[in-house]
Amino acid sequence: MNDPVFVVGVGVISGIGNNVAECLHALVEGKTGIDKIKYLKTNHSDLLPAAEVKLSNDELSAISGLGPAVSRTAMLSRIAAQEAWDNSGVENIPSLRTGFVSASTTGGIDKTEEFLTHFLTDNSKGKLRDIINHECNSITTMVAEKLGICHHISTISTACSSSANAIMYGARLIRHNILDAVVAGGTDALTRFTLNGFNTLLVLDGEYCRPFDENRNGLNLGEGAGYLVLVSERVASLLERDPYCALTGYFNANDAYHQTSTSTDGDGPYLAMSGALEMSGLQPQEIDYINLHGTGTQNNDSSEGAAIQRLFHPHYPKMSSTKSFTGHTLGASAGVEAVFSVLALHHGIIYPNLRLQTPMSAFPFVPETAFSRQPGLKHVLSNSVGFGGNCSSLTFSKL
Amino acid sequence: MKAYIRSAIAISPQKTFNNPAFLDDPAAYRDTRLTSIEPDYSEAIDPKSIRRMSRIIKMSVASALACLKDAGIASPDAIVTGTAYGCLEDTGIFLSNIIQENEEPVTPVAFVQSTHNTIGAQLALLIKCSRYNNTFVSGGASFENALLDALLLLAENKAANILVGGMDEITDMSHAVLSRLGLYKRQPVSNLELFNENSKGTINGEGAAFFLLTNTSSPNDLACIDAVATFYKPDAATEFISSFLVSTSIKDSDIDLLILGNNGDPKNDAIYSQVQQSVFNGIPSINYKHLCGEYPTSTSFAAWLAANIIRKNSIPAILAQGKIPKKKINKILIYNHYQNIYHSLMLLSSC
């Protein structure tokens, strides 16, 4: 039950690129994906920047092989999950028990918005094809079928920590010998539902977000999908290529403080990080890099920072929020950032926290402001914090 | 993987909440949808909190808190929920608001409470539970995955007491949409006569059911959960059922009672008839969806039913219909499929 779980495939699509290579290139070059909203039809496009995937639904349809009328969430999922699956080579091994555990908060709500526009005037109106994939799980099953995965298909939704919990569940299904290989992560498209929701909560920055800056003023939304392929030791040994790394620790905790904000002392993130470290058998000073949740809101960054101070003082690892590149991709964020964490470890690189000018005065640490090569990276921690106090952390370790 | 059910509480279209009687006075409806019988929540939930809660949150929080109280657990080591549709009412309110107010919604309340993890989150907040908290939104396998997650946690020794629940709500909007998709009968029917209707479609249902699962037995346990398994679009139901029986080391003759997911739709129910003529041949069976309606997490109602049948060693008359021979009920197998997409099996036994 404590057998190692290996990461053997990665796939990602986000505002900074449509695949792993493009995202990696933007991360190295320090090129943000945040821009004026171009693809989502919304009244807020001039006022609220976001990190959209730079492809129309028709273009995504052509790449994903899904019909142009299906949810954008499904197309993003298919592209990233397929990249991870192909990257892993697992498909070439016969008779494995495979699973797809995908996370999402929006599901097919982009199409539901279209449906309701007509339905609200007359409930016999609205195209049924726009509503049949409203449920998050419809997106998951649609993509699983394309991947040819059938032994286990499930969907998790715990707000912005959803994908981390999908990765945890996938790893546990392997450790319990229920599955041999799992594609785990998550997907979320930018929608009017989430854009207006966060805007009404007054947490969106009208400028490009500045995570962990003293003068930060909120988050920018993003969209994307990110997946890992996790396998047992036996399956890893059958693959031609060495695994990227091992998933050595994970922990899920609840902040139990407020529906939408995190406690001042960061109880939830603290429990998640310390639990993940404990499972991986690591001391805080052994962590080389933290991929922060770092949304750029006043509340998140103070709370997460406080938790980091409690756990790591005085040995602070290097850290950065890649949401300064991708925006906050919500249910997909922990999947996208798990991929970035695995790549950081694999290539020995640390990403900059863009636009950080004035470090937060409350803390003695400063996130990285420049890209650097760190060939000796051994252990990386990835944090996620969500609505409803759902906090989860993952640790990845070099083999 | 085995869990003891210390308590089980359901709010459903039947008088299941705060009622020591066991379905002895079945609620009859003539409709295409069954609505939960809701209690006076002010006894269970702080009135200040109730005001903002939608129906599904209230049903779920009230049954979860009652479940903890029954089990004598102040705060569990994990909270796991399963819901296919999540908080539909709040989702519908906020979506409509965006459309009608031309993207200038006035309040974020419905948005905040629309996330699928709201119920787990509200529970964590109310009882100050900072432990494991997870929400599955896996369509017709949502409750089953929540249950599997709980069984895995118990096996990992990560938790001793786990609160697990399944819930879904009907809203006017969802009923209108699902009706247009052809899921339900065209005319109102009597729910208690559902299996004599012989017309296309089923009846819509809803409810919330919570269970406190533990890794140690106590004299108060209702029953044990031995295993849960889900199958996605299986080629042949008989095959996975046989392999499930092998993997759980039970023979079909060990099963005292089957609880089947028949929902009154002939095409849907043909799958159950088929397995009853093969792998389940000769095993007494009962249905449950005429009591709670059809919905993706109805298996949480079935599990509540099974746990109570085992504990009381008695099948309510409305279900037995005088056809089940009286004998000690030690093992119940629940077999359900939701729209022939996910099939699931849950095995419960006396402790």
Image (tube, coloured by chain):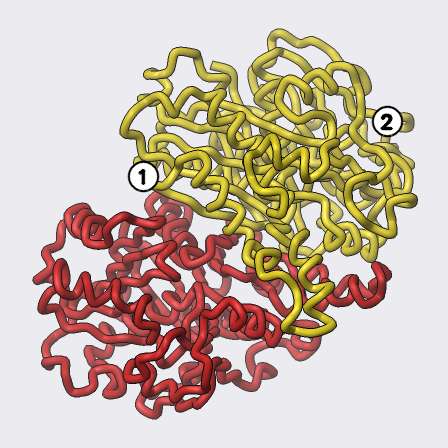
Q: Position of residue A38 (x, y in %)?
A: 82, 39
The residue carrying mark 1 is A178
Q: Colour of chain A?
A: yellow
* Chain on which label 2 sits: A
- Secondary structure under badge 2? loop
Q: Colour of chain B?
A: red
Horizontal side of residue B175 vs B158, given as left or right: right
Disc number for residue A356: 2
Q: Residue B10, image x and y in percent? A: 43, 75
Say which amino acid is labelled 1.
Ile
Between A25 and A283, the one nearer to me in the picture: A25
Vertical side of B333 occupied by A10: above or below = above
Say which of B265 and B44 sits in front: B265
Nearer the observer, A152 or B301: A152
Q: Position of residue B178 (x, y in %)?
A: 52, 69
Question: Which chain is home to disc 1?
Answer: A
Residue A36 location (% of width, % of height): 86, 37
Q: Quadrant of residue A316?
A: top right
- Quadrant in the picture for residue A231: top left
Identified by mark 2, the residue type is Leu
Count of numbered circles on the image: 2
Taking the spot 35% from the left edge, 89% from the top edge, the residue there is B26
Q: Quadrant of residue A391?
A: top right
